Every structure is written in C-alpha cells, then in structure tokens.
C-alpha cells in the first residue's frame, strides 16, 4: 500500500472523526482502505456498491471538505469497490465508479471487469436504488399491542415486547426471541413491537422480514455476485425483525451471513427481534455460535391461552368488528376451541358468516354446529394433556400418579414416555413439557427422551410400549 495515500487518508479520517457521530464513523469509515494517490486523486477501497452509494448520499460534503483540505481544490476521490468473488477466481474483483460530477469529490471512468456490470442489490425492497427512498418497514398495522390481549399465557413475552418498544437496543432483551406453537401470536407480537417503535422513534429504520424471504434474498445476492451489498443493507437497519428463524435450519450459508449481520447490529446497539416455533435449546441444525447469540437476550414463550384469555380475545374481536353476541355463545366457542388463537378467531368468523349467509340468528345451537364442523375440518395438534391421558390409560394409572414424584420404575418409565411423545408430537419447548408433566425442568425432559431412545433399541418390551403408544397418538 502507498504510504502517502495512507497518510493523506489518515488526515482526512482525523477531520471526519471530529465532525460525525462515533458510531457513524465506526460503521462507514473504519472499513475503508486507502489504495493509492495519483495526480491529486485519492483511491479508496469500499466493501460494496451499497456502501459507496451510502457515502455519496450522506457524507459527500464532509469528504469534499476533508480531501480539499489535504489535496487542494482539484482533489478527486476514486472509489474502488471490492466485489464478492464467487466464481473461484484467484484475484478479487474490483469496480471503479464513473464520474459523479460532484466537484472535488469525484471518481474516474474505468471499465468494470465483470459480466454483470450493474450489480443491483442495494435495497431488496426498493427498485431501483436506495437514494432518497425511505425503506419500507413491511409491518402490518392491524397487528398492534391494542389487539394483542394480555393473559397468563403471553404476559412475559408481551411485557418484554413493550419494554423493547420503549427502548429498542437499550434493554437486556436483545435479541428478543419469541417462540411458541402455530397460531399463538408470534408474528402479531413481532409486528406490534415494530409498529410501536415506529410511532415512538420515527427516525429509526425498522424492517420486518420472514427468514424464508431473507434466505431467498441471500441466494439471489450470491448469484448476482453482490453479497456485500446484501450485508451492508441489513447492517443499516436499526430494528431488524426476522420471523420464523427456525427456517434457517440446515442453511449454512444463510446462517453464516446472518451471524455477521447479527454481530454488527448487536455490537452497535441495534435491536434484533426473532420469532420461532421452538426454543433455542430445541432447534435442530442451527450452528452453535448462532444459538448462543439467540440466548444472549430473552427467550419468551407464547403458550396456548387459558379460558379467560380466550373469552377476552373473542370479545375484543367482536367489538372491533362491531358484532354483538351473547356471552353464553362466546363462552361455548372459547370452551371448545383451545388449540390456538388463529383457530379461535377462525371459528367466530365462520359463525358470523353462517348466520349472515343463512339469515339465522346466532344461537348456542348454531355455535355447536359450526364448532363441530370447524374442529372436524381442522387438523388437530396432539396436546400434552391428551398425551398424558393416553399414556396413563395405557399403563392403567391416573394422570396424578404419572406426574407424581415417585421413583417407582414403571411410573418413571411412563412419565419418560409421556415426555418423549410430547417432544415428538407437539411444538412445546422442553421447559414447557417439563412444567406440564410433573413440574420438571428441561434437563429432565432431555434425559427422558434420551432414555426412551436407548431403551427402545435395547429392550424388546419397552420397544413395544413405544410402538403401541405411537399408534394411539398418531393423528
């Protein structure tokens, strides 16, 4: 590297550092390398085209002042973009930007040594480019805190979400991982946090994206040879919300890039919010270094709502939709649909639709018909309560005995089988399974699952227990 170029750039950096926020300096100027100095033109290498565009958009004036101070009025700045080398070439790709006609800060025309001369990733949500364009948050305004009712099943997660919304990046809940089964409100809560942050901090960049879409964008960036642009786009987000993060399982390339994005955001005090259908301890094929970071903040579980919460959810929905319904009908629906909030709301919508289409009054009898059909047509998820009942009946004991503290061998084995099948047939976390089956901890459940696996392969009679119960529990 040319020493003169480095000394000129160091002087520029000293000036810039004194005139911008420390975080901005760290993010946008520390990664730049001085390459050469020729005829009052300083060449600097930046990590991506996105990076270059951001500098031109936000820091061109201070760059101009700093460079003019060092090299005089005829100073020029040449950007050299380091391109991702994904085709096995030994030399790194570079790209020099054509002249921008911005006075002292400009660059020179040079051919781009790439097949794709117009790498495009800048902002995955805005085409073309990012200049003067606001990044859309992708949040759904219908998913807010107002219609996310609090109950015992979601109190921790909801309150943690409110704390994060009040002080994004400034609490110990970073990342905030919200996990739980299907239809319990993970996506709703994630959107509600994002919406609340946007209202309180309009200047913050909030972005919601599914892990599936994130993965597809990453794959596209690799194909187009602009992985760095992809990374730098996500590194400017203040609040990143990734839904269904378990989708990253087995995708090592996406996990690697997410690891670097996560580290950058976390180190710079930005907020990360994740949702998953399982707790970190239960995630398969996710790298340990990522799982350990998921555990840095708070993992909050959403459980199935209790009866009182289900009634409140239905009343709130009916109120929002301007529909009146007798309490006994609401309570009937709440009593018979327990699995998740999505099914609960789906049943009440079906009931209103049946009443409207057939011009029938909404009665308990109509509710019975609708609930019966709805339950029949909805694939049921085996509950932990149901598993405990089936296992207890099979071994001719009651559920209280199954859950007891006794160490009698046949009861311990029954309890271990219940835990094993709860892990197999439900999406509950190990901690949740343990708390529901005799108030055990997640380590006990993990031990139970390993014991069942071992005994199944060594004990013929025990293997028969597993086979018989599998048939009884299969949906």
Image (tube, rainbow, N blue to C red):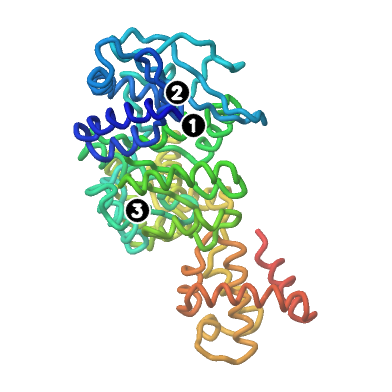
Q: Disc 3 versus disc 1: distance between alpha carbons?
A: 25 Å
Where residue 85 sits: x, y (%)?
A: 59, 30
Give the vertical position of 88 relative to 180 (above or below). Answer: above
Where residue 332 sits: x, y (%)?
A: 40, 57
Q: Residues within 10 Å of mark 1 (few under 14, many from 20)?
A: many
Report the disc number at residue 228.
1
Frontmost residue, 111 versus 214 = 111
In this view, the residue farthest toward the right is 460
On-image quarter of the C terminus: bottom right
Residue at the disc numbered 3 = 174
- Mark 1 / mark 2, whichever is N-terminal: 2
Where residue 245 sits: x, y (%)?
A: 50, 47
Q: What residue is at 53 percent from the left and 39 percent from the top?
A: 212
Which element is circle 1 on?
helix
Image quadrant in which you'd find residue 321: top left
Give the vertical position of 5 relative to 24 (above or below). Answer: above
Task: Please indicate whether residue 51 sits to the left or right of residue 119 in the image.
Answer: left
Q: Are marks 1 and 2 in contact (CB under 8 Å)?
A: yes
Frontmost residue, 294 versus 11 = 11
Residue at the disc numbered 2 = 49
């Amino acid at each position: 590297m040319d020493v003169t170029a480095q000394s000129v750039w160091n002087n520029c950096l000293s000036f810039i550092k004194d005139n911008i926020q420390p975080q901005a300096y760290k993010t946008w100027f520390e990664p730049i390398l001085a390459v050469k100095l020729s005829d009052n033109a300083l060449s600097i290498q930046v990590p991506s085209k996105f990076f270059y565009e951001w500098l031109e958009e936000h820091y061109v004036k201070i760059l101009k002042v700093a460079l003019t101070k060092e090299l005089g009025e005829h100073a020029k700045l040449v950007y050299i973009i380091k391109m991702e080398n994904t085709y096995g070439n030994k030399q790194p790709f570079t790209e020099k930007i054509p002249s921008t006609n911005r006075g002292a800060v400009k660059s020179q025309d040079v051919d781009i040594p790439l097949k794709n001369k117009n790498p495009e990733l800048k902002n995955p949500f805005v085409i073309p480019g990012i200049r003067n364009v606001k990044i859309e948050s992708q949040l759904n305004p219908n998913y807010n805190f107002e219609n996310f009712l609090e109950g015992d099943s979601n109190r921790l997660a909801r309150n943690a979400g409110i704390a994060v919304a009040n002080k994004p990046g400034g609490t110990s809940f970073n990342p905030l991982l919200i996990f739980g089964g299907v239809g319990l409100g993970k996506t709703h809560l994630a959107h509600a946090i994002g919406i609340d942050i946007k209202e309180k901090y309009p200047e913050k960049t909030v972005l919601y994206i599914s892990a599936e879409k994130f993965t597809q964008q990453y794959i596209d960036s690799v194909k187009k040879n602009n992985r760095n642009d992809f990374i730098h786009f996500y590194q400017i987000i203040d609040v990143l919300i990734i839904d269904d993060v378990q989708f990253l399982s087995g995708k090592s390339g996406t996990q690697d890039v997410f690891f670097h994005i996560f580290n950058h955001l976390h180190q710079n005090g930005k907020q990360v919010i994740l949702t998953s259908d399982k707790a970190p301890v239960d995630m398969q094929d996710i790298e340990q270094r990522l799982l350990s970071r998921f555990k840095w903040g708070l993992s909050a579980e959403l459980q199935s709502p209790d009866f009182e919460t289900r009634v409140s959810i239905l009343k709130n929905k009916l109120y929002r939709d301007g529909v009146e319904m007798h309490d006994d009908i609401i309570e009937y629906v709440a009593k018979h649909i327990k699995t998740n909030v999505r099914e609960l709301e789906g049943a009440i919508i079906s009931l209103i639709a049946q009443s409207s289409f057939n011009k029938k009054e909404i009665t308990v009898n109509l509710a019975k018909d609708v609930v019966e059909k709805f339950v029949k047509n909805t694939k049921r998820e085996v509950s932990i309560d149901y598993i405990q009942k089936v296992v207890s009946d099979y071994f001719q004991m009651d559920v209280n005995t199954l859950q007891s503290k006794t160490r009698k061998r046949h009861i311990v084995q029954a309890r271990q089988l219940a835990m094993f099948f709860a892990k197999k047939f439900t999406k509950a976390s190990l901690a949740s399974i343990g708390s529901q089956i005799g108030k055990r901890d997640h380590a006990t459940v993990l031990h139970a699952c390993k014991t069942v696996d071992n005994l199944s392969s060594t004990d013929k009679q025990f293997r028969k227990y597993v086979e018989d119960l599998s048939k009884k529990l299969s949906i």
